[in-house]
Image: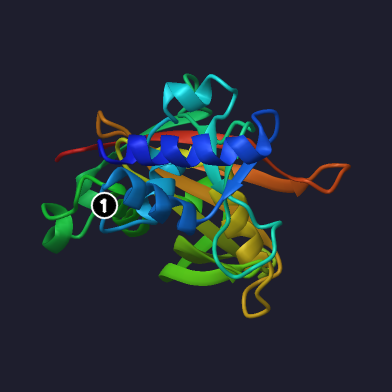
Amino acid sequence: MAKYKPIIKWVFDHQSEEYGTEEEIPFHRDHIEMAMEDLDISVGNVPDIPYAYRSRRPLPDEISKHGYTAVVIDDKREGEDPTYMFTKTEQLIPVPDTVDETHQTSTSVLPEAVRKYIGKDEQGALTQVRYAGLLDDFTELDTYHLQSHLRMRVRGREAELDDLYVGVDEDGSHIALAVEAKGEGETLNRNQLIRNTRGIQDKSEYPNSVRTLAVKLDEDGYFYLFEFEVYQDDEGEDKLETDQVWKYDFQSE
C-alpha cells in the first residue's frame, strides 16, 4: 500500500539518527504509531506494515541504499512485544532458476467437491499439496496433516506456522514437518523460516526432529516445494540453507 512507504521511511530516518547506518537498526510498534501520527496517516492493521517489508516488497531505495535488505523480527532483544529490525542480512529467498525436479500432475487427484473452488493463493497451494499427497514423495516419509495456522511463542514473541505435519519414516520414527506458504507477490523469508523451526523444536509436545519445508506459488500458477536446513554456525548464529526445490504443474483434466 502507498501509505506504508512514508511510514517505514519515517521510522528508519528517526531510528538511524540514534543507531547510525552501519549496523542493524531496531524499532518497535510504538515507532510505527508515532510515524502515523506525525505524518497524519491512518493504517488499520499496523503489524502488516513490517510484515510487508518482510515478505511482500523490497525496502524503499532511500533505505536499501544503505545496505538494508528487509525487516525482520529480532528475537535476541528482551521484552514481550515484537522488536523489529532493519537488517543487512539477505532475507528474501527467490524461486531458483534451476530446480532439482519438475513434476506434472492432474487436478483429477483433487476431490471433485473442492476442485473448482480451490483458491489461487498460498492456502490453495497448501490444499493441493495436502489432497495430492505431495509431501510423501518430496520428503520420502508417510506424512499426516496435524494443524493449520499454529500459533506459538518463539523466544517470548508470537509466531504463526501455516501448516504442521507429522512424518513417519520406515523405522516408525516421527518427524515434525514445519510448512510455510507464500502466494503470488510474496517471497519466502529466511528469518520467518528459522523462527518457525525453532518454535516447533522448543515445544515438547511435538517430535524432537524437525524438517523445514515451504510452498511457493508463482504468478504463472506453478508452485514449488522447498526444503531447508536450519543450523547454527560456529558463532552460534542461526543459518538457513536450501536443500532441495521441486516444481509442480497442476494441469486441468
Comparing 210 with 1, the one in front is 1
Find disc 1 in the rendering and name its residue. Answer: 124
**Residue 117 visible at all:** yes
Determine the secondary structure under disc 1: helix
In percent of width and height, residue 179 lies at 49, 55
Residue 247 versus residue 4: which sits nearer the camera?
A: 4
Q: What is the three-letter code of the residue carrying label 1?
A: Gly
Residue density around tag 1, few if under 14, some if 14–19, many if 20 or more, within 10 Å: some
Residue 94 position, x and y percent, is 47, 29
Give the image location of residue 117, x and y in percent: 12, 55
252 relative to 246 in the view: left or right? left
In the image, farthest residue toward the bottom:
205
Q: Check the picture and name the quadrant holding the C terminus.
A: top left
Looking at the rendered image, the quarter that the N terminus falls into is top left
Is 95 rendered above or below residue 139?
A: above
Along the horizontal axis of the image, is 217 left or right of 205?
left
Please name whichever residue, 165 or 105, is drawn nearer the observer in this view of the structure: 165
- Position of 133 compared to 169: left or right? left
Tell whether 47 sits left or right of 101.
left
Q: Residue at left 82%, top 42%?
A: 233
Scheme by which the image is coloured: rainbow
